[in-house]
Image (cartoon, rainbow, N blue to C red):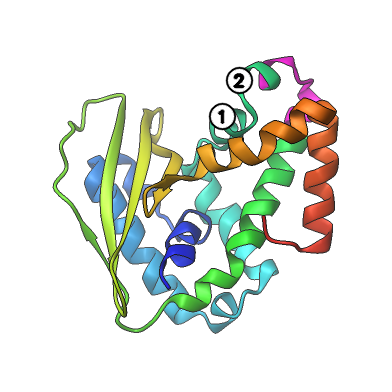
Amino acid sequence: MFKPFVAAIVTSVALGSAFAQEAPDAFVKTLSNDVVDAVKADKAIQAGDIGKINALVDTKVMPHVNFERMTSRAVGEQRWQGASADQKTKLQAEFKTLLVRSYAGALREVKPATTVALKPFRGSATDKEVEVQTEVRGAGQPVALNYRLENAAGGWKIYDVNVGGFWLVSNYTKQFSPILQSGGVDGLLAKLAELNKSGVKS
């Protein structure tokens, strides 16, 4: 199945500085091709090597993701605003680890025939926020993979991803909400740390 793989794209793509000057759909096309090529070429990543995936994310992906915005939306703006600076730093670190661990195994789904096709772009390169739609093709049914991007200083930045009709941030908001209601931010941090330590997929 491609669904877990396409969710992993945001945590496994090799990006270049030239993307900053590209139109959003061209940015996503280049990003997607680089993801597929990078995974096909690295057996350790395909095997779910957390160290290699983390290194790739830290050096190539994070500069092109507004991860603070992604985390704040997953936690909820009210909870985020009420969190201390230390809590915000820890939330981003634990959330990143959760995403990497959750989708590391999905990279095994990349096959030689895997390709990513752009759907017609309906926005403008001058928009502050856009959605770019793509489709992952290969063995089995194609899977929709859409990106929400913001036009920030330094180029386009990802702040959400939709896999097969489900937005990543919204899914985590639903999972985090009951934990936050019962234990607050510290309760969520403890739960995330527990999941990450055990390696359990969320």
Residue in view at x 42 percent, y 55 percent:
15
- Residue type pointed to by label 2: Glu
Residue 51 position in % (x across, y down): 69, 68
> Does residue 68 belong to the magenta stretch?
no
Q: Is residue 148 above or below residue 129?
A: below
User: In the image, residue 71 lies at what x, y percent?
Assistant: 61, 34
Q: Which of 22/127 is in front? A: 127
Counting from the top left corner in percent of width and height, residue 105 is at 59, 72
> What is the crowding at mark 2: few (fewer than 14 residues within 10 Å), some, or many (at least 20)?
few
Circle 1 — which element? helix
Residue identified by numbered label 2: 77
80 lies above or below 144: above
| 195 with respect to 102 (left or right) | right
Query: Where are the magenta residues, as a range?
Result: 80-88
- Whether residue 196 sits left or right of residue 130 in the image: it is right
Number of callouts in the render? 2
Residue 72 vs residue 85, the one in the foreground: 72
